[in-house]
Image (cartoon, coloured by chain):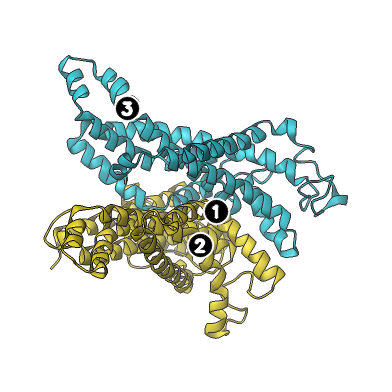
Amino acid sequence: MKSRKTLWFWCCLLGLIVFLTVFSSLLAPFSPNKMNMEEVYSAPSSEHWLGTDHLGRDVLSRLLEGGKVTLAVASSSVILSLVIGVVYGGISGYFGGVIDTVMMRLLEALITIPSLIIILVFQAIIQGGMWGMALLIGLTGWLVTARIVRSEFIRLKEEEFVKMANMFGTPVWKILWGHLLRNSIPAIFVVTLFNFAGAIFMEVSLSFLGIGIPPAIPSWGNMLYYAQNDILIGAWWIALFPGIMIFLTILAINFIGEAWKNPERRRVND
Amino acid sequence: MISKWVGKRMVMGIVVLFIVSFLSFFIMQAAPGDPATAFYGGNAQTLTAAEKERITRAYALDRPVAEQYLAWLGETVKGNLGTSSKEGRPVSEIIMERLPNTLLLFSVTMFFIVIGSIWLGTVAGMRAGSIWDKGLSTFSIATSSIPAFWLGILFIYFFAVTLGVLPSSGSSDVDGNGGVVDKVRHLIMPASVLIVTHVGIYARFLQESIKIENSQYYVKVARANGVTERSIRKGIVRNASIPYLNYIAITIPSFFGGSIIVESLFAWAGIGQLTVKAVATKDFPLLMGSIMVTGVLVVVTLFIVDLIMYAIDPKLRKGGVR
């Protein structure tokens, strides 16, 4: 019972973070981009709860608005990688044989290349904006999903109810959709959760390096990009709060994912 | 004697290097501007017709794309990575300067991560249900949720800005003759950031595999026959280390990704920081070179892990395949 309570706790926390960021434009006390040169680097106070940054912008307002950007990029990229992963893993697992072997060898090779490197290459050439980033993270983030979907399909293909459906001449798409995919949903859900955490990590890392989301748009990663210089003059509040938000968001996702993980299924997937 | 399995892993490594080389070659094709000028490295105005002719011939730039790729690959394998378009020096020279720093950071962090995770994982895994067992699970989830660079910023604030005991950035002092002590002082923060954010997940993985092994039938039989707890533990850890090593192999690429970010934060003069710099300044020959080198580093590391697995797992030595 204790684990159910903790699961609720983390779900509520994640829900709260999502709520705060989605309604950032209503909740933010200031405009996230409003500069005030008279209040540069002011420490947290009753007016600016979390202080101001190097342009006198309100950190709390930017934190809420930046969360919206970070979570929007992460969720859209996760949806993209979910689709690619399900299709790739599904084809590989359902058809098996030579197709499966070739597709899995390719996947193993791709998994060896740090996805950060691939994204860096494309960012160097196209220097995309916010949605370009989401596209790149999505295009590089589907490998684990594909692996899980494949192993689920292979496992389910041998189940009696699927064999039965085959015998009765159920159309292939119905078997794929109704039997294989629907029964894989718990496993796909867990891997997608962890993928979501990975996508947040990727966005904040790239923006932190200064090659992610354009600097004009606030995001948690972008805020930390400026914070690394501000910290040298002692302005700790600019770095502390975006980091805490990233940490709490990923922590909540990880705990929810752990609670959902079925111990029996886990051994198969690892 | 090389087994079938080791041979297979070597082929895999070569395939990976080919993919990385396509990626790298793609940069050359997609980069704006004239490839010959990019390889020349200096100012386009100072590029003489004869020099341009020579570069065009060396890289087969007037030939079809496939031939260009082969020519480029030939030059790359020979160690000629072109000239940095921002620094005007050969890319291979710049990379060789920085390679020792990356190898140092990588080997030190990996050493402590492996030692630390084996210790924590064994202690927690052998005592199922204890405070160690539960504590490690929470510790591992918590530490792996921290963005490494954020932890690094906090470290800089505490140890460099507030306490002033460690340098905030760089990989050596300015004149570069601070010796070993200076190197260690610069290494402490980037290394500990990587260790803290990674040791937990590896320890947890070993802990889980030890728990699985511990519940196996052969362990029960050994215990019932009065085999000492010491040798039982030895056997369990040995068997559990195969999935553990496999896990290290799977996560090595993302570890390299993480160290790129940490190198950049601490201005640690390694390959990772070089890659980011090349992207930011659009120095395409430098970017191609550093990507190729990173690819080689990953493949070599994975191969070493494979060899260790081969040494530990008798199934592989007898010609089995995982």
Left or right: A208 in relation to A138? right
| Residue under pointer 2 | B196
User: Which amino acid does the dot numbered 3 rest on?
Assistant: Asn
Q: Position of residue B90 (x, y in %)?
A: 47, 69
Q: Residue at x 53, y 73 (%)?
A: B187
Query: Could you say which chain is coloured cyan in the image?
Result: A
* Vertical side of A35 occupied by B103: above or below: below
Question: What is the total number of numbered labels drawn onto the structure image?
Answer: 3
**Pointer 2 chain:** B
Query: What's the CA distance linking mark 2 and mark 3?
Result: 38 Å
Residue B72 in view, yes or no: no
A115 w.r.t. B95: above or below: above
Q: Secondary structure at mark 1?
A: loop
Asked if disc 1 and disc 2 are in contact, CB closer than 8 Å, the reply is yes
- Disc 3 packing (10 Å; few <14; some 14–19; many ≥20): some
Q: Which residue does the image show at 61% across and 79% down from the upper left?
A: B173
Are the residues flagged by discs 3 and 1 from a single subunit?
no
